[in-house]
Image (cartoon, rainbow, N blue to C red):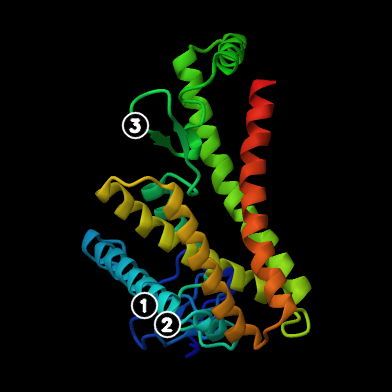
């Protein structure tokens, strides 16, 4: 009888168990036999008895949540206090203590839309005492008579009540805003790649820079928005302050990442906020035109 206890590929089941006599196990992903805690070929963690029990699963969920949050909070602190350093660390391979830039962008943008209602784009009506400001996804909450007529006609065509159609438009606008913000980040990455291709030759490097600058902008906007609500302030002047702060941040970050000053940096400082604004406003206007006409 052979001492070899390995399991042939043709005889293995869907979920091989560890061998009790020597601690060996067969990876269910790549079929590699090992006696370590993780498969040396693909990295799959060893399956053990009770892995799917409520207690074990709960501990894993808590660990993953706090691990991500811990890295995220540390990365946001670095993002806020040292412009460009987070980007530089990622590009130079120091990535263990920070989440992937795309994951960070998704997490920050989720909080951004949840807490701020979208980009710092507000519409105010002055036909009543005080000025009412609404988020961009509520642009049609108080339409003009002509726009309201178009909305009612469109709602009737779709077989919806006017109120239900308004709610649908608000939901669609929120999706459009999220897509437009993401598209603006990609567009800014393309601008950076065009302007600083001699400093960084890969497009992904410039997109990482744009993602981190966008994360900074969203953190600042959320913070300012909460202060505005707390103090009951209007959003106009604060929006201008945010624009200046983000612009100065980008200049400091670009100097660190690209190691350059001069005209290209000045051009990028103008193009990035302009491009982001055009993409967001253009996306909203296109959706409204498509919806109404």
Which residue is nearer to you in this view: 234 or 175? Answer: 234
Residue underneath mark 1: 74
Q: Residue furthest left?
A: 55
Residue underneath mark 3: 130
Q: Assess whether mark 2 and mark 1 are in contact (beta carbons under 8 angstroms).
A: yes
On the image, the x and y values in percent for residue 180 come to 61, 48
Residue underneath mark 2: 97
- Residue 30 in which image quadrant: bottom right
Instruction: Indicate which disc, 3 or 1, sits on the residue closer to the N terminus.
Output: 1
Q: Is residue 273 above or below residue 293?
A: below
Q: Residue at x 56, y 44 (%)?
A: 177
In the visual, does 210 lie left or right of 53?
right
In the visual, does 218 lie left or right of 257?
left
On the image, the x and y values in percent for residue 70 come to 33, 74
Instruction: Kindly report the distance in space between the C-alpha atoms of the residues bearing marks 3 and 1.
Output: 41 Å
Q: Residue at x 69, y 63 (%)?
A: 271
């Amino acid at each position: 009888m052979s001492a070899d206890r390995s399991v042939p590929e043709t005889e293995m089941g869907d979920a091989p168990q560890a061998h009790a006599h020597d601690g060996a196990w067969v990876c269910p992903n790549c079929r590699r036999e090992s006696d370590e805690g993780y498969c040396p070929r693909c990295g799959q963690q060893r399956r053990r008895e009770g892995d799917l029990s409520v207690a074990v699963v709960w501990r894993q969920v808590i660990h993953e949540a706090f691990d991500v949050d811990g890295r995220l909070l540390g990365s946001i602190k670095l993002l806020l206090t040292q412009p460009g350093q987070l980007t530089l660390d990622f590009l130079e391979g120091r990535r263990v203590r920070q989440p992937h830039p795309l994951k960070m962008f998704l997490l920050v943008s989720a909080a951004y839309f949840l807490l701020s209602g979208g980009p710092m784009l507000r519409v105010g009506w002055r036909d009543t005492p005080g000025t009412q400001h609404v988020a961009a996804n509520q642009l049609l909450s108080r339409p003009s008579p002509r726009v309201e007529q178009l909305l009612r006609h469109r709602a009737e065509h779709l077989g919806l009540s006017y109120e239900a159609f308004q709610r649908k438009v608000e939901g669609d606008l929120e999706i459009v805003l999220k897509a437009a913000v993401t598209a603006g980040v990609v567009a800014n990455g393309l601008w950076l790649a065009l302007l600083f291709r001699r400093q960084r030759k890969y497009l992904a490097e410039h997109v990482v820079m744009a993602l981190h600058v966008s994360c900074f902008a969203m953190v600042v906007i959320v913070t300012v928005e909460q202060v505005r609500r707390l103090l009951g302030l209007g959003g106009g002047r604060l929006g201008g302050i945010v624009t200046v702060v983000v612009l100065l941040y980008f200049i400091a970050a670009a100097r660190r990442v690209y190691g350059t000053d001069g005209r290209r940096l000045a051009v990028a400082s103008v193009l990035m906020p302009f491009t982001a604004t055009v993409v967001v406003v253009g996306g909203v206007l296109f959706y409204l035109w498509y919806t109404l006409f």
